[in-house]
Image: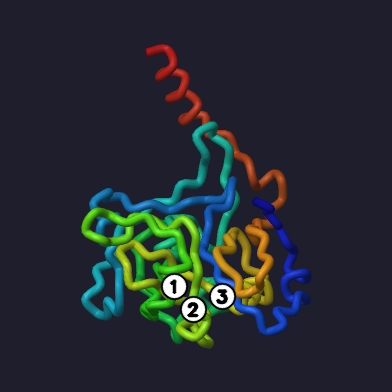
Amino acid sequence: MRFVARDYASVLNSSSGGRLRVFCFTVLENHEWILPTDPSVYELLFSLSGVVGPGWVSLSMEFLHESDDGARRLRSDFPWLGEHAPILRPRAVSALQETLAAHGELLPLNAPEPVSLFNATRIVDALDPSRSQIVRFEDGDILNIERFFFDPVAIGQLEMFRLPMRSSPVFVTEAFVSRIAAAGLEGVAFRLLWSDEPETTEETLSFPSHAEPDDRWRPNWIAALLRALRRRA
């Protein structure tokens, strides 16, 4: 697998030439995460499919600002929760507002800083099962997709969508990735899943934070003390 960390200019200047490339969100090393304070909430997040609307109850979330070794994680416009549940800070919401509104809904979250969950409501049966590699449960439901092959006609002009399956990732096209680059958003990465080009190399497009080095790492003496106590126990 070839990993590519392109700068904004290279993404903006690359011409798609009419090609269709489909990505999913992927974790970016050393950048912050955000997690539910109640683990039972994961079930709700995995089952999102279609419009939630006014019945949504804001979930309690907490940031994971430090790694296990106490190193300070970099700030992100998209704090990581999972490929199925993109989380956006206000800067990302403002930059992508029209695109987000055309493809889903923003659901408020209860966190120490303002963040929103994006629920992609465009559910599209765009997977070609005969050309994809799919692992299924005994009842036929999809357990995992090891290789994706999409139907370009089904996707059309969409920039964001889900598949009609439980815990579907939020898929995005290269047009959406280009919007990320144009807006200068940081702390987000995308993994290429499929392209309509005959020869495709797997890659990851990364947009890391440009925080100054002194802002990146801040030792947490409490965490260090707890780790030391665990080693002695």
Does residue 186 appear in the picture of this structure?
A: yes
> Residue 16, image x and y in percent?
70, 79
Q: Quadrant location of the C terminus?
A: top left
Q: Residue at x 57, y 60 (%)?
A: 191
For label 3, the residue is 173
Q: Are marks 2 and 1 in contact (CB under 8 Å)?
A: yes
Height in image: 160 above or below 201? Answer: below
Q: Residue 87 or 141: which is nearer the viewer? A: 141
For label 2, the crowd category at 10 Å Cα-Cα, with few meaning under 14, some 14 to 19 and many 20 or more, is: few
Q: Secondary structure at mark 3?
A: strand
Three-letter amino acid code of the residue under disc 1: Asp
- The alpha-carbon separation of the residues under discs 2 and 1 comes to 6 Å
Q: Residue at x 45, y 59 (%)?
A: 133
Q: Residue at x 66, y 73 (%)?
A: 197
For label 1, the crowd category at 10 Å Cα-Cα, with few meaning under 14, some 14 to 19 and many 20 or more, is: some
Q: Secondary structure at mark 2?
A: loop
On screen, residue 182 versus residue 170, left or right, reads right
> Residue 215, image x and y in percent?
65, 47
Viewer-side label of 2, 3? 2
Q: Quadrant of residue 126?
A: bottom left
Q: Residue at x 27, y 54 (%)?
A: 137
Q: Earlier in the sequence, mark 2 or mark 1?
A: 1
Q: Residue 179 or 227: which is nearer the viewer? A: 179
Three-letter amino acid code of the residue under disc 3: Thr
Q: Are marks 2 and 3 in contact (CB under 8 Å)?
A: no
For label 1, the residue is 128
Q: Residue furthest front?
A: 130
Q: Residue 215 or 29: which is nearer the viewer? A: 29
Three-letter amino acid code of the residue under disc 2: Asp
Q: Which mark is residue 151?
A: 2
> Residue 112, image x and y in percent?
41, 57
